[in-house]
Image (spheres, rainbow, N blue to C red):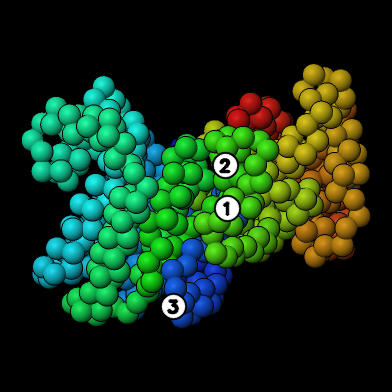
Amino acid sequence: MEILLQKIHESEPNKDNPWEDDVLGRDVIAEFLTNMLSSANTPFVINLNSPWGTGKTFFLKRWMLSIQDTHPSLLFNAWETDYSEVPFIAFISEIQAQLSNLDKEGKELKGKVQEWVEKGGRILLKGIPLLIKGGVRYALGEAGLEEAKDLLDTKTENDIADYAGKLAQKSVDDHITKRQSIEEFKKLMEEAVALIPQTEAKLNPPLFIFIDELDRCRPTYAIELLENIKHLFSVPGVIFVLATDSDQLGHSIRSVYGQGIDAGAYLRRFIDQTYQLPEPSYEQFAELLFGKLNMKLIWADDKFVKGIPKMTAPGIFAGCSRMFRLSLREQEQCASKLRAILLNFKGRTIHFVFLCYLLMAQIKLNDQYQQLNKGLIPLRDIWNIIAKHIGQIKEPVSISTISRSASYYFKYLNDEKELNNLRQRVSELNSMQEMSDELNQEFGLLWEISKTYDDCKKHIEFAEMAAQLG
């Protein structure tokens, strides 16, 4: 498989078997939550909390596909419409399109949905004080302006501006009028949901609306969308599933309402329950990263390291990550740098363990590693610092082998003198008629280092360049 430069991306699920590439084993979580939420007889908002990069989008897409034959389900990616000045317009437009697709031939549901959208537009115009003559285009944006024209059955921007100006002058966001409009909007939504079982898809309530990437949006966009969800969509038979990093969403809340606000208490006003997605194991996360980065290679051990048979590249990466106790974010950073280096290793021997240790030392032991780059300490001393950092932890034999093999690189790549010592040691081991398994592993590894000495040294150079990637 060729490694190509690309952004980290979410692979698209197989519609016939959504969970086939689920290395985190989260299909059981989706089933558990579906059974729990489908029994709700009231509106419900649940937040799936997990740090960025841990597979929330992956999970939502597959969860939605896995229930599409039994429950109506819609997915709204908030970040993709973050450019819009009015989140409400972007949201109901997307929901309209997806709801209408549930019944391609039916007219009753489509009509009810269209009526619901139009009512939403009028609520919007009644509730936004920015809709004065001089600010219509700014408030709605080009797409929103066209939408508003349709909703109001007007033909020109001036008509909307005049109408909006009159609304502003007369204070038409009067509390009673607005409340009545919201109730009408919610009633229409409830009627539309009730029609879904009668569609050709023969789906059962509730309607699942998945909202992804809310925590990546502009703070004002995220908060306005969140408030609309709770106040305008609290309709029986509708379940909202948000996927967020709650800590990051908390930063957005504080940026809008001030640092003194209790972000957790604020979120509880809109979210009925939070489900904490379990943190993946090192092995699971390595598989996830290598898949996202198109690096899911299974290399033979003689292609990058001797003495560690039957271990895949993700397996070695996971073992090294465990040794260094990398966080999820640190593992993602390391994998991205690793990929950048591998793009430069065409025609060279890849010593994968050594490369992982160099990159992870950069991340976890940055101050000490900078001394190596400045020529203040030799590579051998870096190994002593690494060995102290990883400590004497009990790990499977294969992981211990990784650590032992890494030490050889740091020991024998210091200078010309160490190169001579390396060659002498290889000669000594080669002269033995019989060797233990441990000595045989040592011989294979040292022989590989001596044979590809220049490539080994190049690892240090590439690791230093990759360190500059943010």
Question: Camera-side residue: 172 or 341?
Answer: 172
**Mark 2 Cα shell of 10 Å, populated few (<14), some (14-19), many (≥20):** many
Question: Camera-side residue: 249 or 111?
Answer: 111
Q: Position of residue 316 (x, y in %)?
A: 68, 55
Spatial separation of the CA atoms under disc 3 and disc 1: 22 Å
Task: Write down the residue under mark 2.
Answer: 253
Spatial separation of the CA atoms under disc 1 and disc 2: 9 Å
Among the two numbered marks 2 and 3 on one chain, the one whose residue lies closer to the N terminus: 3
Among the two numbered marks 3 and 1 on one chain, the one whose residue lies closer to the N terminus: 3
Type of residue at label 2? Answer: Ile
Q: Secondary structure at mark 2?
A: helix
**Mark 3 Cα shell of 10 Å, populated few (<14), some (14-19), many (≥20):** few
Whether label 1 touches label 2, CB < 8 Å: yes
User: In the rendered view of the protein, which quadrant contains the C terminus?
Assistant: top right
Q: Residue at x 24, y 47 (%)?
A: 122
Q: Secondary structure at mark 3?
A: loop
Task: Write down the residue under mark 3.
Answer: 41
Type of residue at label 1? Answer: Leu
Q: Position of residue 311 (x, y in %)?
A: 66, 60
Q: Residue at x 59, y 57 (%)?
A: 268
**In the picture shown, does residue 74 fall above or below 366?**
below
Type of residue at label 3? Answer: Asn
Among the two numbered marks 1 and 2 on one chain, the one whose residue lies closer to the N terminus: 2
> In this view of the protein, can residue 412 be seen by the observer?
no
Spatial separation of the CA atoms under disc 2 and disc 3: 30 Å
Q: Position of residue 67 (x, y in %)?
A: 38, 74
